[in-house]
Image: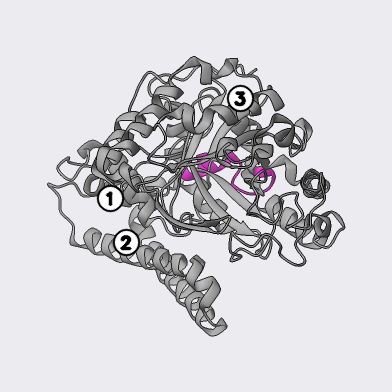
Amino acid sequence: MSDLPRPTGTWWAPSTRHAKRTAVGMAAIVAVLSLITWSVWISPSGPVSSAVSRALGVPTKQEPSADADALQAKLTAAQQRIWKLEGKLQSTTAQSGSRGDQVAQLKAQIADLRSQLGHARTASGSDSSSGGSSSSGTSASASGGTGGAGAHGGSSGHGGGPTVVPGKGGPSTDPDPATPIDVPTKAEVLAQQSRWYGLYTAQSPFNWAEYDQVSQQVGRSTNMVGYFQGFDQDFNANAVQRSWTNGRVPMLTWESRPLKTGNDQKYVPGYTNSDITGGAFDRYLTEYAEALVANGQPVVIRLDHEMNGSWYNWADGTAQRNAPGSFVAMWQHVHDVFDRAGANDYVIWNWSPTRIDALGNAKYQTLDYLEAYYPGDDYVDWVGMSGYYRKAAEAPTFDTTFAATLEQIRQIAPDKRILLSEIGATETGAAVTDGQKARWITSLFDALADPANADVIGFAYFSETATTIVDGARTTNDWRLNSRADSLAAFAAGIARNDIDYDLQEVKK
């Protein structure tokens, strides 16, 4: 059990002391931009504090500066352009359809803009360095930097309270090599007492535009971000660094297939479970793990999710050409390769089946069937599940979507904390006309306030529109939080509640 003190206030609330330590490490130019952007993005009518502005050497509204305005415009435009280009580069369209020369051109544009941004920041250094350089240096010594052992160096400085705090609430930023990031250790992430609230959006964490828009509409910052990779992609340090820069633990859903494989392709040649356990990917896995260690920042890895369904190529089944028990052997093999590379010091392994009562075939709904997919407590840090409200004919409640699966998970792994790793409610059929999605969202927060769900440490909401093919049925669903005004209002009200604050110290780990 954790001996950290119980958090106060709302259930996602950051530790005041931790937030201050993080703020101390900001370079002066970043602080200037954050303050200006906060007043515009979050509270257009609210003035920036004159006292803080004077301390940082920032012109207040009574002391306008054309130079500061010009610098703000230049930096903002450059960063927004970088975000857009990175989003395009990482998008499904770019990765599946662009020619090599187009990708190279995008990378060149990003590099050029980064160079321009660096020159702009350097040029402003003579005016701002006295306001923040000493603070930045203090933060660097306390936190130990961001990479390798330095990431662990910050553990002694965290003291009590939540170890991961949400971002500052304004537009998300890129990592600044000159500014150390105060990143917790894996142990501190696992000991977090306040709940996790994460989002998936179409291009985050490579492009924050939509993510920030949804966060602004909801009215609360997140402390987790989800994204996807395939076994045809190298470790993406940029994704992890961008996440931590904004106070969000990265949660990677890592699929043992090429990323662009259709989700109705049950057999992918060369990517069976036996291919992986047989060593065909050992070099790839080792290099991936070594790159993760070199980056030195914790990552949640949700390896081959929804394995108990029939649609993915890693499920045990004849169509997938995977023998019974092969999923567990594959998971353990990947885990062991990472262990040899030292990567498990940074990886939080999340085992995440799908909702059992929506699978159709009765054999998929038994405890024995789900338990046969569990790799064992030594190979898993968090358990979890995918849970979606899809059908207007169902009652829009937490229990309808989650109860049956959670009951089995608690029997299989009674000492593990549970993350609702991928959840959402659709905006189709009758749900559009009578507010079922909004009622489902309200029920979600009601359930989180129930001490019976004290082992549920948070959720990541899939705020996207997606088309899927399951057992030959093609469906498009609008899962977005802002799909309708009443759905958004229900979520904003739920995330603002103060009664979801029981003590997570009592949850077994």
Name the disc covering residue 406, or none. none
The residue lying toward the viewer, choosing from 80 and 468, is: 468
Whole-percent x and y of residue 26?
43, 46
Q: Which residue is mark 2?
A: 76
Residue 247 is one of the magenta-drawn residues? no
Relative side of 95 to 367, left or right: left
For the residues labelled 1 and 2, the Cα–Cα distance comes to 9 Å
Name the disc covering residue 37, or none. 1
Q: Please, which residue is most extreme toward the bottom here?
A: 101
Whole-percent x and y of residue 432?
29, 45
Residue visible at 34% across and 24% down in the picture: 497
Whether residue 23 is visible to the viewer of this picture, yes or no, is yes
The chief SS type of the magenta part is helix
Whole-percent x and y of residue 249?
54, 42
| Range covered by the magenta-colored residues | 136-150
Q: Quadrant of residue 371?
A: top right
Q: Which residue is mark 3?
A: 407
Mark 1 / mark 3, whichever is N-terminal:
1
Whether residue 413 is visible to the viewer of this picture, yes or no, is no
Residue type, label 1:
Thr
At mark 1, the secondary structure is helix
- Badge 3 crowding class, 10 Å Cα cut-off, few under 14, some 14 to 19, many 20 or more, is few
Residue type, label 3:
Glu
For the residues labelled 2 and 3, the Cα–Cα distance comes to 48 Å
